Amino acid sequence: MTLTVTNLGISRGGVPVLEGVNFVLSAGDALILRGPNGVGKTTLLRTIAGLQPPLEGSVDGAEDRVAYAAHSDGIKPTLSVTENLTFWASVFGQKGIEAALAAFDLETLADRPGGALSAGQKRRLGLARMIVTGRPIWIFDEPTVSLDTRAVGMFADAVRAHLAGGGSAIIATHIDLGLEGTVLDVTPFKARVRDIFSDEAFL
Amino acid sequence: MIALLIRDMRLAFRAGGGFGLGLAFFLIVTVMVPFSVGPQSELLTTIAPGVLWLGALLACLLSLDRLLALDWEDGSLDLLATAPLPLEAVVTVKALAHWITTGLPLVLLAPVLGVLLNLAGEGYVWLVVSLAVGTPALSVIGTFGAALTVGLKRGGLLLSLLVLPLYVPTLIFGAEVARRGATGMDTATPLLMLAGITAGVIGLLPFASAAVLRVNLR
């Protein structure tokens, strides 16, 4: 049940951004990714989630076990909070959204359309979606954007409960969440400038 | 998969979902044609199958740019790509939802509008049959075009340019079935060709759509 990242090199828009990334994430562990803007945290997370192929190296143990929370929450403005969550639950073959609603204090908003939620409420709904996926590895890309202190607390509690239940999490963030976990600063893995072959080489 | 189908249909039917856009366009085109052609019922009878097919095709085209672009913009597509559903299933379901909300209503509305165009009596059955067999291909081909242009802002023009040539065979054989039916000729050959095109694109294009979508999501 471990996620192993070996000598991973990734690129964004054809330009290598990170290389030589190694880590092992076991059940019950959290990995906090840090690093300045543009260093490649999002690209790293998307690669682990399987949305883009790595330049080199490998990611093992991620397939069909990862739930990914991106910058945007994928909320449909014309569907209610319940309908949005129920949809994602059934896509992942799960039932029951009450626990997720309760974890992020969304019960009172359950019938409100997604378009009428505030930015923080949308984010809470996007994070609640992770609970209904039932996947063991949670990947968050700056989960606390537009959340207030209380909601950050809810988020930290939800992640703690997930870790206690044998899950694991990778979180890219700039703030201290109060979670125990390995901190990985990705700055040292910044890719050196190299000659990559491009189509121009043929011209 | 059923959850995705229900969600897409629900989104289409709710406010701002675009259901009715294609239907309204189809209605406008077929109502306006008799005015522009003039009061010659024989001429209208002649052109009715072709006009109805062209109207249905353009109405289908109208809603294609929303097919995947909305899910791309709000990030749902990324999340769907990491879900247990294979992308091939996602694009197939999305094409099906598009057909149910766009193609199927056109099939049902077409005979009513045929009256306005003085369609010959024998033509109604064949018009409905040809549209029912042909419009699924329009949705599937359109999904492929939408997948190709998903990351582009204002990709609608490029989408139309890519998709319209692919629509030509369906249009030719679909309108031919309706025309032959209306004039009492044998419809078997064009109908089989039309069914063959539809079966072929349903079998092949979802894989192509999923492949280009994977590239576009990177």
Image: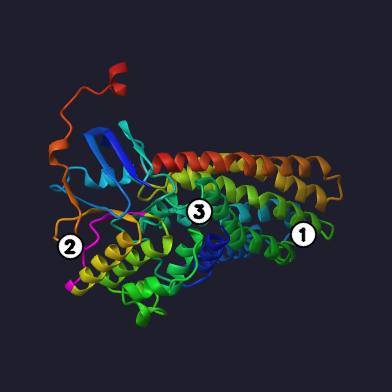
The label nearer to you, 1 versus 3, is 3
- Chain of the residue on which disc 1 is drawn: B
**Is residue B86 highlighted in magenta?**
no
Instruction: Name the one closer to the observer, A102 or B30.
Output: A102
Residue named by callout 1: B119
Label 1 – label 2 distance at C-alpha: 70 Å
The numbered dot on residue B191 is none
Residue named by callout 2: A177
Q: Position of residue A109 (x, y in %)?
A: 36, 79
Label 3 – label 2 distance at C-alpha: 43 Å
Quarter holding residue A194: top left
- The amino acid at mark 2 is Leu
For image coordinates 17% across by 72% down, the residue present is A149
Which quadrant is home to the C terminus of chain B? top left
For image coordinates 50% across by 44% down, the residue present is B145
Q: Which residues are magenta?
A: A137-149
Residue A110 versus residue A126 in the image, above or below: below
Q: Is residue A203 visible?
A: no
N-term-proximal mark, 1 vs 3: 3
Q: Position of residue B51 (x, y in %)?
A: 66, 54
- Chain of the residue on which disc 3 is drawn: B
Q: Position of residue B191 (x, y in %)?
A: 77, 44
- The amino acid at mark 3 is Leu
